Amino acid sequence: MAQWFVAAKKADFEKIAGKFGISPILARLIRNRDVIEEEQIDRFLNGGINGQYDPFLLQDMEKAVSILIPKIKSGERIRVIGDYDIDGICAAYILVKGFRALGADADAAIPHRIKDGYGLNEALIEEAASEGIRTIVTCDNGIAAAEQIAYGNRMGLTTIVTDHHEIPFTKKEGEKEYLLPPAAAVVDPKREDCPYPFKGICGAVVAYKLVTALFMRSGGKEEWKALEEEFLEFAAFATVGDVMELKDENRLFVKAGLRLMEHSKNTGLKALLSVNGLLGKKLSPYHIGFVTGPCLNATGRLDTAARALELLMETDKAKAMDLASGLKELNEARKELTAKGLLQAADLVEHTALKNDKVLVLFLPECHESLAGIIAGRVREKYGRPAFVLTRGEEDVKGSGRSIEEYHMYEQMSKCSRLFTKFGGHKMAAGLSMREENIDVFRKEINDACTLTPEDMEEKVHIDIALPLSYVTMEFVEELEKLEPFGVGNPKPVFAQKDIVVLGEQILGKNKNVGRYKIRDGFGKEYEMTYFGDVETFGAYYRQRESIFIAYYPSFHEYMGKRSIQIVMQNYK
């Protein structure tokens, strides 16, 4: 059974409410998100994109700009090396289009997930050198490519790294020793010596900051004005797509970027919205994370992410629609393969000794290697444990891991780094390559080192406020919209009410997975409630009890031009 926690963070909610013209309930919700100081509260409620941080606060930004401006002016060719996911694709787009707007001769290479693997490699360096290119700028990769960058240095190439991943390290006498690659400049907010105020930005935001800094130094204010809004859209798209926390600066980017996307001038993005039935609609992080974003990711998984970059670069409407339709079809195929892989993974966990492991290491040799991360994420959600899914690649075994909040995946992997031919990542996710004969050793060592308790692995339901349903009015639900956009790091507020009696139910949806219920609270008032989940299990549960405790979120439901309040149950006990 899930553990329920009610937030008990203190503040003078009446004072905050009075100062900012909000209700004490909203003041409490903001405090629950660790927004404490008056300046922070004002930024949270009223902050716009003008409140973003100076790009020159990023370590080595000055160095990167001073290297690139003369190269751009002299017409030297610049190659951007991106990555095959949403973040890498958006970052590459921002850099190439930004460099070209400054007058650069710039292009991009996106590694092929299966042929090249993640990030910068020697083949990409050799290819650039053979074409007469002497400058490489990485995005969303490069921080762990010390050997490859050293190889490029020996060939006379200048490499600038822009990345947001954790800095590789070794441990000497218990102390971390960070290993920066030998690049001409390394722009990564995760650097220990980087004074940038917010470390949680994605690779596309780092790319956006580099282009912003170049325009600041070059003085092209009018050109930048025309580009900035479009680049903000893609910085926001990547922030959500790469599952960054919607806190601090990220929230400002996403808040502004979503509104800009609704009226996007980018032909490719408009086509992607159109084929998914979203053109002209109010967009939320859900539409990026679960509808349009996976279409971009699908290209890198089942084909080549160069197709996704081509879509963003396309200016012809008909061609863009063809490209976008192809991406949507790829995503449908990816969904089918994912469902098949998840069934195999669940079978392994439930019918072998693996079910006793705290860290799940699942070898699915026939699974498409590009789907390992998605399946690992689903396994993590299903079993509440860190999960690695390994597949058989062309040479080594390749895999991806997804973690839970209480487990720092990258640090734990570092303890058995000798078993990997390559690995990288951060607290919540990681990628790796290894020899097949090392799988069982890895499984044993990662579990032997694991200190997770049963409580750590239980589902946790975090309640903001125990709030009677009678408090939920149209005005209250409207006020909750001030907290948007919701996502990782800024979840929808969750309220709780006890003594709920279910009076009747109606099961809806093509897959019979939506429940609509008539409920009554302890004061005798009746309400409509919706539940998107395992309605069969819930039905069996509430029928055995006189009353239940619900965790809920109130939202608006619009139908036939009418707006009503919808109580959405998040959990029950």
Image (spheres, grey):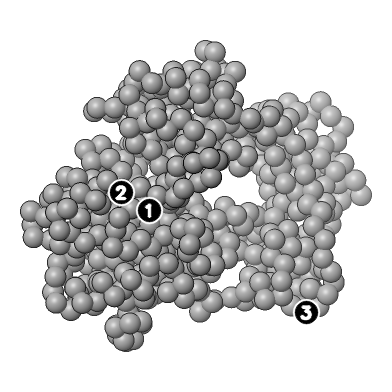
Q: Which residue is mark 3?
A: 19
The answer for how far apart the CA atoms under marks 3 and 1 are is 46 Å
Kindly identify the residue that appears in the image at 79 percent across and 28 percent down. Answer: 543
Q: Nearer the viewer, residue 305 or 393?
A: 393
Which percent across, then down, holds residue 221?
33, 86
Kindly identify the residue that appears in the image at 79 percent across and 70 percent down. Answer: 23
Mark 1 or mark 2, earlier in chain? 2
Q: Nearer the viewer, mark 2 or mark 3?
A: 2
- The reply to whether callout 2 and callout 3 are in contact (CB within 8 Å) is no
- Determine the image quadrant of residue 117: top left
Q: Residue furthest front?
A: 173
Q: Taking 418 as reference, is 474 above or below it?
A: below
Q: Is residue 179 left or right of residue 36?
A: left
The answer for how far apart the CA atoms under marks 1 and 2 are is 7 Å
Q: Residue furthest right?
A: 523
Please rate how many residues cluster around mark 1, counting C-alpha atoms within 10 Å: few if below 14, some from 14 to 19, many from 20: some
Q: Taking 356 as reference, is 202 above or below it?
A: below
Kindly identify the residue that appears in the image at 58 percent across and 61 percent down. Answer: 247
Q: Secondary structure at mark 3?
A: helix
Which percent across, then down, holds residue 162?
35, 60
Q: Which residue is mark 1?
A: 180
Q: Secondary structure at mark 1?
A: loop
Give the amino acid at mark 2: Ala
Give the amino acid at mark 1: Leu
Q: Nearer the viewer, residue 389 or 549?
A: 389
